[in-house]
Amino acid sequence: MKFALLSICLFLVQPFVQSEDLTITHEGAEILKIHRNDFMNDLVGKPVIDHTKINSLLQRLKKEVNQEPVNAKIGKSEEILPEQIGYKVDVRKFTEQLYIYLFGSGPAFLEAPRLPIHPKVDSELLANIRTQQIGHYVTYFNSNNKERTHNIRLAAESIDSHVVFPNETFSFNKVVGKRTKEKGYLPAPVIVRGEVTEGIGGGICQVSSTLFNSVDNAGAKILQRYSHSKRVPYVPEGRDATVSWYGPDFSFKNTYNQPLLIRSRVYGGQVSISIYSSDVVNFESRKIPGASKKLPEEIELGQNVDSYDVE
């Protein structure tokens, strides 16, 4: 009993050791905890900041805090879905507060300072540039081919509500991104060098070809457009635009005085792409031949054909 009381007394008289950590929070929640000694080097008896470790800390902080903005877009019921503001670390303010802690003493708490990132496309802009249709094109496909239909729908959704500002260049590969299983693309028949094989993202070229004709109808400046080596069935001869992640791309430039809005939708066995802008856009449309409504015949893997489809 005496030993227990003595132990309690010794514990009570021991000095309380307070943590000297810097606790970094984001929206009130702790995300990082550091100690000043880990960021200081002793050089000739003087503490010197290790900037390599500071940069490493900043990268960790950015992963926790940075958030990309989200552009406004048009929903399935034609309603405008509002934009979302993004955020990034305010490096200057954070560095200032960090240095105060490093050269100070005792513990500290710091809410990670942020700067807002405003999206390029907001609700007001969308409302203004969806008033006048200046280009339109429709192609047809066999919706019984579920995998190809799925890929067409994914690619069409990728470009829907995309806005191309004046003097800006649109790249199909950049906007749609790499066609992978992780993004949901499925293996579907593609035609390579005259023979049908199976590849991830089969059907994408129908979307890029439909977009090309719609953009051409709107009178935009075509920068890159490559035809397949042989004819494809969903557009008139010479009106296709083949794309491949490691190969050809389709791109155009908005040379008009107003932004262009791409609307891309899939209805059953139709790909419908329209180009919109504001009421004050100065544009010159082009007449282009329409696509055949006749559906192509289904072909088996390994069958030789008279067309060539990269995707």
Image: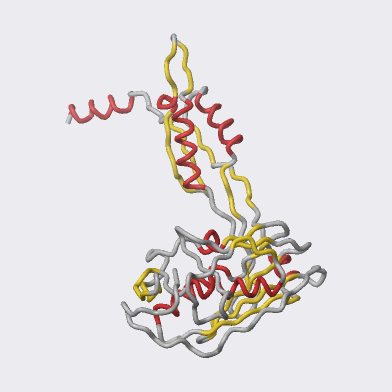
State the image coordinates of residue 50 (x, y, percent, origin top left): 46, 24
Residue plotted at (37% across, 70% down): 199
Residue 20 found in image quarter = top left
Residue 282 found in image quarter = bottom right
Residue plotted at (53% across, 38% down): 110
In this picture, residue 67 sits left or right of residue 297: right
Image quadrant occupied by the N terminus: top left
Residue 307 versus residue 26 in the image, above or below: below
State the image coordinates of residue 194 (x, y, percent, origin top left): 39, 74
Residue 53 found in image quarter = top left
Task: Determine if residue 45 is in view.
Answer: yes
Residue 130 versus residue 252 in the image, above or below: below
In this picture, residue 64 sits left or right of residue 236: left
State the image coordinates of residue 207 (x, y, percent, origin top left): 53, 74
Image quadrant occupied by the C terminus: bottom left
Residue plotted at (67% across, 60% down): 253
Task: Determine if residue 311 is in view.
Answer: no
State the image coordinates of residue 192 (x, y, percent, origin top left): 39, 70
Count of picture labels: 0
Q: Residue furthest top?
A: 44
Q: In the rendered view, how is the structure colored?
A: secondary structure
In this picture, residue 65 sits left or right of residue 192: right
| Nearer to us in this view, 110 or 281 | 281
Q: Residue furthest bottom?
A: 294
| Nearer to us in this view, 278 or 128 | 278
| Nearer to us in this view, 259 or 1 | 259
